[in-house]
Image: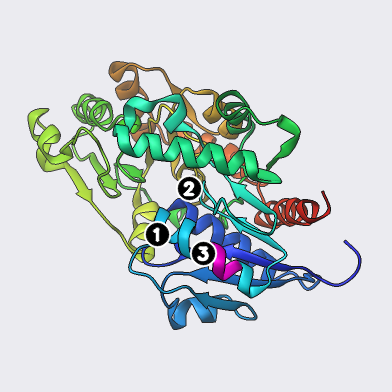
Amino acid sequence: MSGPGLHIGVDGRELLGRPTGVGRYLAEILGAWIGDPTWPHRLTIFVPSSPGDDLRARFPNVDWHVVASTSTGTRWEQMRLPRAITRAGVDVFFAAGYTAPLRLACPFVVAIYDVSFFAHPEWFGWREGLRRRWITRSAARRARRVVTISEFSAREIVRWIGIRRDAIAIAPPGAPPLVDDGDAGPREPIVLFVGSLFNRRRIPDLISAFAAAAGDVPNARLVLAGDNRTSPRIDPRALASTTGVGDRVEWRAYVTDAELAELYGRARVFAFLSDYEGFAMTPMEALARGVAPALLDTPVAREVYEGAAMFVPDDPTAIGAALRTLLIDDTARRRLVEAGRERLRAFSWRQAAATIRTALEEAVRS
């Protein structure tokens, strides 16, 4: 756009603490904006508590606006944040985590990564599901633009929320840097899962499939890395014990970046059996580190990883056979990794950041 730059406000809650997918996505977008020498706009990041020296150092040349509160949820977003945004003189606001303040004086863009709480309400408690559906629908319909991360999610947003397709911009995540050190030596027979444990991610089926594969691969292990958000609650350790592989299944509720890099560097197979995702970033991380993915055969998995993953049907026996193949057939594993690394070249954080920048600029003009 021509003329003076805009004052862009950003909801930075997800950057604090231990960032999950939304926080990592937002951090990469901010990094691409800040690193762009042509970036003309002013950024103010709104947070409920001090960001700390590490975040301030990571994102220089931005203003941090602390809207102090012990709550970081809907009350903070809807009651305290709008006044702070107005006082700061923001021209346009980027709400990076599904919802946005509904009483904003300025236009806003909201990022909605999936609508699982519409498509599968049974996965959520009734109160939580109702809250998510109401506030996400309200935010999407008030927003000047909606950002999402795949064509699949765009279709789902149109279907469940009822906004026009031309109001949705698609900004897929960028691929992580390719790392070759894991291919320097033999991989360990590790099947790795990374991500929060949700019921939709078929943890019982994964453990059962691993148990079937492990009978032919004596040293095989399954490592689950992610916090347990299942409801009804699933105990992965108890399931592993019941299926006879309790001593070969490890669950880590949280791993540091260094620990995660070490796991990716050792594993042969990445398993992700999710019924419903907006994109699924962790298989991309696995491919970048030389780990071949086995994915449940879904439309979004095909959209993102066609040719770069072994797609499996909804059948533990077939899943077990796929895991066994990738654990023992190094040629098949390397073929997927090579195809995957070529596929990753299509995904750029710079392009995603440019798409969201355009959406924010158009939101002001529209």
Q: Distance between the residues labelled 3 and 2?
A: 43 Å
Q: In this view, does 70 lie above or below 122?
A: below
Q: Is the magenta stretch mostly helix, strand or loop?
A: helix
Residue 261 is tagged as 1
Q: Give the labeled residue for mark 2.
A: 290
* Quarter of the figure with residue 254: bottom left
Q: Is residue 272 left or right of residue 347?
A: left
Q: How many labels does the image show?
A: 3
Amino acid on which disc 3 is placed? Leu
Please report the bounds of the magenta region as a residue range. 81-85
Q: Give the labeled residue for mark 3.
A: 81
Q: Which residue is drawn at 33% across and 68% down?
A: 70
Q: In this view, does 151 lie above or below 138?
A: above
Q: Position of residue 190 (x, y in %)?
A: 29, 43
Amino acid on which disc 1 is placed? Ala
Q: Is residue 308 left or right of residue 219?
A: right
For the residue labelled by badge 2, is the local secondary structure a helix, a strand or a loop? loop
Q: In this view, does 156 lie above or below 340?
A: above
